[in-house]
Image: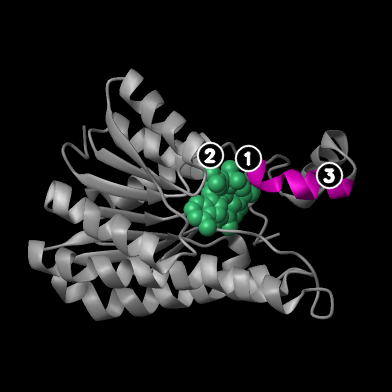
Amino acid sequence: MILKDRIAVVTGAGSGIGRAGAMIMAREGAVVVIADRDQASGEVTASDIRAAGGQAEAIATDVADDTAVEQLIDGTLDKHGRIDILHNHAGIQVGGALTEVEVDGMDASWRINVRAQFLAARIVMPAMVAQGGGVILNTASNSGVFYDREMIAYATSKHAVVAMTRQMSLDYARHNVRVNALCPGWVDTPFNEPFIAQMGGRDAIETYVRTKIPMGRWASAEEIAEAILFLVSDRSSFMTGQALVIDGGESIG
Ligand code: NAD
């Protein structure tokens, strides 16, 4: 139990990678606060953790809402007295090239993918400094370290997540707060359903993924959760300001 009794907050933990990360943190002994805008799926993750013998609670939170983010962090600090791990995971993908993306889509991408992470980290940081340290993990994407076509809103916001991570890590390293970015490539979660529909279904996407990714497949959320565990635990105790890419070689190929 390498996270025994640590208090963890995970946004977007009702589904996909966030859920798998929350499950593995709980398995390793963390008390996990599940924050998802979809209250029902957040409750399911929390009850699945409890059914497996772990400790979790769900707090319905839309990270686009400043007040909700403040209540999430302040409420967790009030209740548990500390936050050891903040995993800023909730995010959206708005696809399209410059002239295809609406201004609203750009605003939403930056609000949810960047601003919400900034805000949650900004609120939690004084507590982490006061308690002698902590870990912040910001979910970016391999789109945060390389470029692909028709990704202006997504790629620019995820590059900003990586930049923000590096900047935060520098400013708080002396306070023993480690800040890293998680950069997955293609992961088989509901996140990609719009893209699957656009491609023409499951068979088409499997062919696409086989062709595009050097390892010839996409990742499971559980594979990414192993990297999350590494990054939020003491196993990565001398690692800060890094963007860990887990993408089957896509960004190299
Ligand atoms: P998912 O769709 O399986 O789960 C996302 C969860 O986030 C959902 O439960 C959703 O309700 C929640 N959510 C969305 N907007 C929210 C908001 N405003 N406030 C609170 N909760 C919100 O997706 P996933 O695969 O876990 O991916 C989500 C994150 O991972 C995003 O940051 C995304 O950019 C990143 N990512 C995903 C992939 C992938 O292929 N799945 C690849 C790279 C990066």
- Of the residues shown, which amino acid type is indicated by label 3? Ala
| Lower position in the chain sequence, tag 1 or tag 2 | 2
Q: Which residue is mark 1?
A: 189
Vertical position of residue 60 compared to residue 177: above or below: above
Asked whether 190 or 225 is in front, the reply is 190
User: Could one spot residue 247 in this view of the protein?
Assistant: no
| Quadrant occupied by the N terminus | top left
Per the rendered image, the range of residues in magenta is 189-199
Q: Residue 35 location, x and y as percent?
A: 40, 48
Q: Which residue is mark 3?
A: 197
Beta carbon of the mark 2 residue lies under 8 A of ligand 1: yes
Helix or strand or loop: what does disc 2 sit on? loop
Q: How many marks?
A: 3
User: Could one spot residue 163 in this view of the protein?
Assistant: yes
Residue at the extreme front of the image, as rendered? 67
Q: Residue 250 location, x and y as percent?
A: 67, 56
- Of the residues shown, which amino acid type is indicated by label 2? Ser
Residue at the extreme right of the image, as rendered? 200
> What numbered label is drawn on residue 15?
2
Q: Is disc 1 in contact with disc 2, using a CB cutoff of under 8 Å?
A: yes
